[in-house]
Image (tube, grey):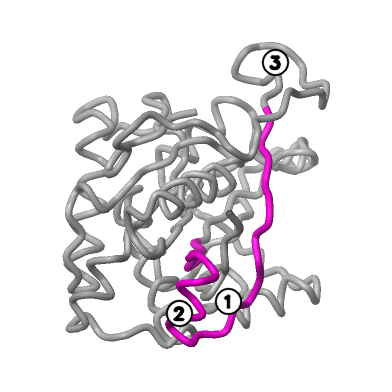
Amino acid sequence: MPLALTGLGMVSSVGWGSVTSCAAIRAGLTRPRPVHDIYVTDQDPLEPVPLTGHPILELTDGFGPIGRWSQLAEACVADLWETARLPPVSDVRFWAQTDWIFVLPRLDPARYLEVQDFGPDLMTSSLRERLGQRLRLELPRQAVHFVHAGHAGTAIALQLAQQLLSARHVERFVVLALDSYLDETSLEWLHMHRRLKSPDQHVGLAPGESGACLLVELRQTARQRGVPVLANIEDMSTGNEAGSRVAGRPGTGRCWHEPWNRSFPKHPRGASWAI
């Protein structure tokens, strides 16, 4: 059953909203800045220079992973709230019929000290509680799902939303995707794996951060609410490749595809998906 996209929210290094961010990206604008949390070596003068990255200034400065995710989430949900003209928190029925899917990075213990010390469940529940407090919304455990699936996360989250909406568990989903490579331990993790762009490694990564959210519902529900449909999501597919950096095998670009009707286990409300 197709999904209707009825709202967008975003925050990035080139804009504090979906309209400004998308316009800047379409125009090819970037805002690289020095990141002083880690230094790389310029082989020509043999001097350390700050890493170049794409931080969102004044939003995430000084925060660790959970704090950065919370800041990104609050900013892009605020944009969604305004642009989609969502009802206030006092509209109990609307928000009770709205579930959330958080699309987060894979919680690799080598990247996140919080996973090593407290485990992934405490890390994700802390994010859920913080965002609920900031938005003044009730976000019970059973109404929040977590997907940790790398770059395929949003597609898998939409597949999950389609399945649950078809089953009439709820009326709509906010799919909230967050990531930041700019916390201290993520930078060290990237540096250890030689993935950072530097004067002597031009094919490396210039780390950044962003948050984006989608409001999706069935077309019938959107018509009943009388809201405009920004796009119809007719189909989607994901794939898996055998070779990867993590597996120690080179990528070939060949993969087998996951079907649109991905089968999730029964009673998935509040579950965490690691794929």
Percent position of residue 131, x then y: 25, 62
CB contact under 8 Å: marks 3 and 2: no
Indicate whether residue 157 is drawn in magenta: no
Compare marks 3 and 2 and give the one earlier in the sequence. 2
Name the quadrant containing residue 204.
top right
Percent position of residue 270, x then y: 27, 43
> Which residue is at a point 18% across and 76% down the rendered structure image?
92
Which residue is situated farthest in the top direction here?
248
Label 3 environment density (alpha carbons within 10 Å; few <14, some 14–19, many ≥20) = few
> Which residue is at a point 28% across and 66% down the rendered structure image?
97
On-image quarter of the N terminus: bottom right
Please state which of residues 70 and 44 is positioned toward the viewer in this rendering. 70
Q: Which residues are magenta?
A: 211-239
Q: CA distance from mark 1 to mark 2?
A: 7 Å
Report the amino acid beneath label 3.
Answer: Ala
Indicate whether residue 234 is drawn in magenta: yes
Q: CA distance from mark 3 to mark 2?
A: 38 Å
Name the quadrant containing residue 176.
bottom left
Report the amino acid beneath label 2.
Answer: Asp
Percent position of residue 145, x then y: 34, 46
Please state which of residues 243 and 196 is positioned toward the viewer in this rendering. 243
Does 253 appear above or below 70?
Answer: above
The disc label shown at residue 18, or none = 1
Residue underneath mark 3 = 242
Residue underneath mark 2 = 79
Q: Could you tell me which secondary element the residue under label 3 belongs to? A: loop
Horizontally, residue 153 falls left or right of residue 243, namely left
CB contact under 8 Å: marks 1 and 2: yes
Compare marks 1 and 3 and give the one earlier in the sequence. 1
Compare marks 1 and 2 and give the one earlier in the sequence. 1
Does 243 appear above or below 14?
Answer: above
